[in-house]
Image (cartoon, helix red, strand yellow):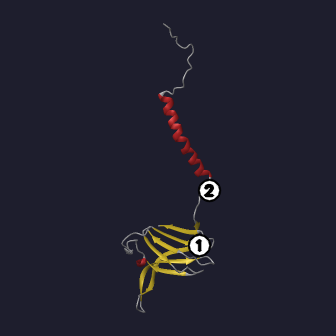
């Protein structure tokens, strides 16, 4: 009967211990996060350009539709400080009540908007004094076709 002899030399096979496997998995997760963090810090992130508009809140006389009289109402006043017109003007109050203006805001033009005309997407109107006004955001298109933004926090 032939006898089989064990191999004379066995190569060691690489084996990870429990701690080694845990360290390898943590390294595989942490290295990409560190790389993305470094990329976000080093690379210049895109940003919106400043819109050359002054925004004020106040009370002004506003004409009543269908009549010659005017009533004093809470208003948002926009004034274009640039020497060019600003098309695609959008104003929002508290990030929820919007107004989009089709007509461009002319160079040096002052626009007086009653706060009651701002509405949500479900057409609920802003009621001045019912809620605190915490922010006003104005966006418009600059001559370079880039979007200009002005954010005001109260």
The kind of secondary structure element at disc 2 is loop
Front of the two marks 1 and 2: 2
Image point (46%, 71%), residue name? 92
The kind of secondary structure element at disc 1 is loop
Read off the residue under disc 1: 52
The part of the image, by quadrant, that contains residue 122 is bottom left
Residue 14 at x, y percent in the picture = 54, 25
Q: Toward the viewer: 22 or 14?
A: 14
Q: CA distance from mark 1 to mark 2?
A: 23 Å
* Vertical order, 134 against 34 (above or below): below
Residue 9 at x, y percent in the picture = 57, 15
Q: Toward the viewer: 119 or 150?
A: 119
Asked whether disc 1 touches disc 2, contact meaning CB atoms under 8 Å apart, the reply is: no
Image point (41%, 74%), residue name? 119
**Which mark sits nearer the N-terminus, 1 or 2?**
2
- Label 1: how many Cα within 10 Å (few below 14, some 14–19, many 20+): some
* Vertical order, 139 against 60 (above or below): above
Q: Toward the viewer: 84 or 15?
A: 15
Image point (56%, 74%), residue name? 53
Image point (54%, 23%), residue name? 13
The part of the image, by quadrant, that contains residue 51 is bottom right
Q: Is residue 115 left or right of residue 80?
A: left
* Vertical order, 118 against 19 (above or below): below
Residue 142 at x, y percent in the picture = 60, 72
Read off the residue under disc 2: 44
């Amino acid at each position: 009967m032939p006898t089989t002899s064990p191999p004379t030399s066995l190569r060691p096979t690489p084996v990870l211990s429990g701690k080694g496997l845990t360290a390898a998995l943590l390294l595989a997760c942490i290295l990409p996060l560190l790389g993305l963090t470094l990329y976000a810090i080093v690379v210049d992130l895109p940003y919106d350009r400043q819109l050359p508009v002054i925004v004020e809140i106040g009370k002004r006389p506003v004409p009543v539709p269908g009549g010659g009289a005017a009533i004093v109402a809470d208003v948002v006043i926009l004034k274009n400080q640039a020497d060019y017109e600003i098309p695609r003007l959008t104003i929002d109050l508290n990030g929820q009540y919007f107004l989009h203006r089709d007509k461009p805001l002319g160079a040096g033009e002052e626009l007086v908007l009653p706060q009651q005309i701002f509405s949500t997407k479900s057409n609920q109107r802003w009621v001045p004094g019912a809620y605190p006004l915490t922010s006003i955001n104005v966006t418009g298109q600059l001559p370079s076709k880039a979007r200009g933004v002005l954010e005001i926090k109260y």
